[in-house]
C-alpha cells in the first residue's frame, strides 16, 4: 500500500471513556430513524469483505460465525459485505444473484437477530463489478493475448510480416520500446492486467449496462427483503461499476456520461427500480464517495451535489467513504490482479498509522460535513453516516454533536474489538481492544484470504470449537468477551 512520504508514526488516542450514565445520555447511543427502520443507537459497522463464503458465494459456518461475533456487541446496525448481484465467478464473496441464495442469507439474518438479542439491525450491500484479469506474463501477453491491429502493422512498418514475426519482434523489445508502440489500453493490460471500464462502449456488455443493471439490483434487493434483511445498501463507491458511472471520469456518450445529470442517471434509475421492487416501506440507502481522490475524478463539491440528488430521490441513508480507485493502484506482480486500495486513493480509504501531518484518524469527517450541510441546505434530513479511523467515544460524539454526521461507522475498530459498543455503553470502555491501524487486515484482504485482526487472531488458539483458517494458524473470530452480568439488566441499571 502507498503511504504518505512523511511517514509520521501515529498512535491511536481514544481518549477518556464515559461512565455508564454519560454513555446513556450521549447522542452516540441515541435512537435514529432510517426511513421505516429505527436504530437503537447511532453506531454502524460498515461492509467489510471477510472472504469466508464458498467459491460459489454461499453462506458458510465461517460467515455465520463472523457476523454473529459482531452482533454480540450490539451495534446499531451491521452491513453485510459487498454481495454480488450477478452469477459470475468472484471467489469467496457472498452472492445474491438468484433465489438459491435466499435460504443461506436467511440463516445469516436469524443468527444476527439471535446473537444481538434483536437489538441490531442488519443491512446487506449489493454490488456490481466489471471484469478484471491478472497481470499477465509479458511474453505470453505479446505472443497470445495482444490483438495485432492494422495500426500496429503500420507503426512497425510490418505490412509484409506475418503475425508470428510481429509477435516475436515485440517480445524482443524492452518495456520502454514497447511503450512507444502499444496503445494506452494495451500497455496498461501488459503492465497491470486487463480491466473493463464503463466507457468501453465498443463492448456490447458494457454498452448495455444501463438496460441490465436496474433489474439486476432490483431482483437482488427483493431477495434481500425475502431473506429478512432490514434494508439494502447499494454499493455506489470505490472502484466498481456504479461509482464509475458517477465519476467525472465517465465520458460515455449515450446519455449516461459527461455532465453530472447524465452520470446520475443510472444510479437514480437503479434506485427507482429497487424501490418499485421492495416497496416504500423498506429501507434503501447507498455507500458512495465523498471524494474520488484521483486526477479528473469527483471532488467533495461533486459529492455534495450527488448527495442532494440522492436525498431528493428518496434514499433513506447515505454512507460516505473516499478513494479506493483503480486509476492510481500500484502495479501488481505477474499473476496477481490490480487492487484498488494500493495507491494514494486507497490510502485515503484505509489510512494507516504511518501518515502525514493530518494523521490517519477522521480524514473523511470534514468532507462528510460539507456534504451533509449541502443536503440540509436543500431541505432534506437524510441521515449521513461518517466513517474512517474512528476509535474513541469522544471522537464519535463530537462528530454527532457538531452536526458533521448523524451516524458513526466503525470498521477496523469493530474488527479489533466487536464488543466496543457494549463495553462503552456499560461504562467499561477501558477494557476495549483499540485498533492500531497497522492495516494487517487490509493486507489479508488484498490476498483474498480470510480477514482477521493481529490483536486477537493467535490468542487462545486451544479454545474448543473455534473456527480456524485452513492452515490452522489463525482463529477466524475474536475471543468471546467474558461478561459477568446480565447485559439487559446491567444496561437498565
Image: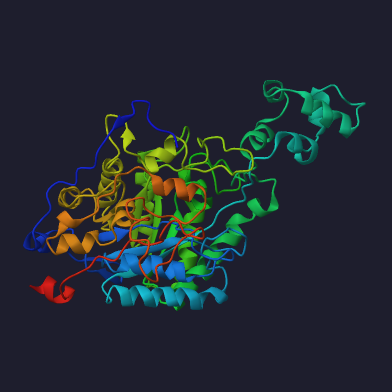
**Residue 138 visible (yes or no):** yes
**Residue 281 visible (yes or no):** no
The percent coordinates of residue 399 (x first, y second) are: 20, 49
Image vertical order of residue 93 relative to residue 301, above or below? below
Q: Toward the viewer: 279 or 84? A: 84
The percent coordinates of residue 128 (x first, y second) are: 54, 57
Q: Report the residue at 16% width, 76% height from top.
A: 486
Q: Report the residue at 59% width, 37% height from top.
A: 333
Left or right? Give the position of 138 relative to 330: right
Q: Residue 2's quadrant in the figure?
A: top left
The percent coordinates of residue 39 (x first, y second) are: 25, 68
The percent coordinates of residue 196 (x first, y second) are: 62, 46
Q: Toward the viewer: 130 or 410? A: 410
Where, quadrant-wise, is the N terminus in this rendering?
Answer: top left
Left or right? Give the position of 313 relative to 102: left
Residue positioned most to the right = 160
Amino acid at each position: 500500500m502507498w503511504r504518505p512520504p512523511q511517514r509520521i508514526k501515529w498512535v491511536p488516542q481514544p481518549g477518556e471513556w464515559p461512565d455508564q450514565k454519560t454513555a446513556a445520555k450521549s447522542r452516540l447511543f441515541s435512537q435514529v430513524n432510517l426511513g421505516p427502520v429505527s436504530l437503537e443507537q447511532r453506531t454502524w459497522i460498515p461492509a467489510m469483505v471477510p472472504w469466508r463464503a464458498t467459491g460459489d458465494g454461499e453462506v458458510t459456518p465461517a460467515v455465520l460465525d463472523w457476523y454473529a461475533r459482531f452482533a454480540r456487541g450490539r451495534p446499531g446496525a451491521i452491513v453485510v459485505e459487498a454481495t454480488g448481484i450477478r452469477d459470475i465467478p468472484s471467489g469467496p464473496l457472498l452472492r445474491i444473484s438468484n433465489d438459491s441464495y435466499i435460504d443461506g442469507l436467511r440463516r445469516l439474518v436469524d443468527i444476527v437477530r439471535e446473537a444481538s438479542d434483536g437489538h441490531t439491525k442488519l443491512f446487506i450491500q449489493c454490488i456490481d463489478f466489471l471484469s478484471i484479469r491478472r497481470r499477465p506474463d509479458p511474453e505470453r501477453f505479446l505472443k497470445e493475448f495482444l490483438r495485432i491491429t492494422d495500426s500496429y502493422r503500420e507503426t512497425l512498418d510490418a505490412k509484409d510480416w506475418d503475425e508470428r514475426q510481429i509477435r516475436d519482434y515485440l517480445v524482443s523489445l524492452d518495456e520502454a520500446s514497447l511503450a512507444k508502440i502499444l496503445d494506452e489500453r494495451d500497455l496498461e493490460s501488459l503492465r497491470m492486467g486487463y480491466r473493463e471500464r464503463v466507457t468501453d462502449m465498443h463492448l456490447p456488455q458494457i454498452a448495455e449496462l444501463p438496460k441490465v443493471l436496474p433489474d439486476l439490483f432490483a431482483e437482488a434487493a427483493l431477495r434481500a427483503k425475502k431473506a429478512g434483511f432490514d434494508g439494502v445498501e447499494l454499493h455506489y463507491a470505490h472502484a466498481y461499476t456504479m461509482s464509475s458511472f458517477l465519476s467525472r471520469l465517465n465520458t460515455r456518450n449515450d446519455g449516461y456520461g459527461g455532465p453530472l445529470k447524465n452520470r446520475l442517471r443510472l444510479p437514480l434509475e437503479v434506485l427507482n427500480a429497487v424501490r418499485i421492487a421492495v416497496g416504500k416501506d423498506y429501507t434503501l440507502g447507498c455507500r458512495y464517495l465523498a471524494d474520488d481522490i484521483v486526477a479528473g475524478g469527483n471532488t467533495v463539491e461533486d459529492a455534495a451535489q450527488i448527495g442532494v440528488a440522492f436525498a431528493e430521490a428518496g434514499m433513506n441513508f447515505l454512507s460516505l467513504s473516499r478513494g479506493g480507485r483503480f486509476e492510481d493502484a500500484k502495479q501488481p506482480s505477474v499473476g496477481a490482479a490490480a487492487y484498488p486500495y494500493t495507491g494514494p486513493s486507497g490510502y485515503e480509504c484505509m489510512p494507516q498509522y504511518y501518515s502525514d501531518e493530518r494523521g490517519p484518524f477522521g480524514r473523511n469527517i470534514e468532507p462528510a460535513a460539507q456534504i451533509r450541510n449541502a443536503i440540509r441546505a436543500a431541505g432534506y434530513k437524510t441521515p449521513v453516516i461518517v466513517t474512517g479511523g474512528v476509535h474513541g467515544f469522544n471522537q464519535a460524539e463530537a462528530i454527532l454533536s457538531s452536526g458533521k454526521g448523524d451516524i458513526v461507522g466503525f470498521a477496523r475498530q469493530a474488527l479489533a474489538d466487536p464488543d466496543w459498543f457494549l463495553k462503552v455503553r456499560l461504562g467499561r470502555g477501558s477494557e476495549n481492544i483499540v485498533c492500531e491501524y497497522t492495516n494487517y487486515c487490509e493486507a489479508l484482504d488484498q490476498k483474498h484470504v480470510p480477514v482477521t485482526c493481529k490483536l486477537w487472531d493467535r490468542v487462545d488458539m486451544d479454545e474448543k470449537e473455534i473456527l480456524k483458517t485452513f492452515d490452522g494458524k489463525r482463529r477466524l473470530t475474536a475471543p468471546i468477551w467474558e461478561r459477568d452480568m446480565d447485559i439487559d439488566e446491567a444496561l437498565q441499571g
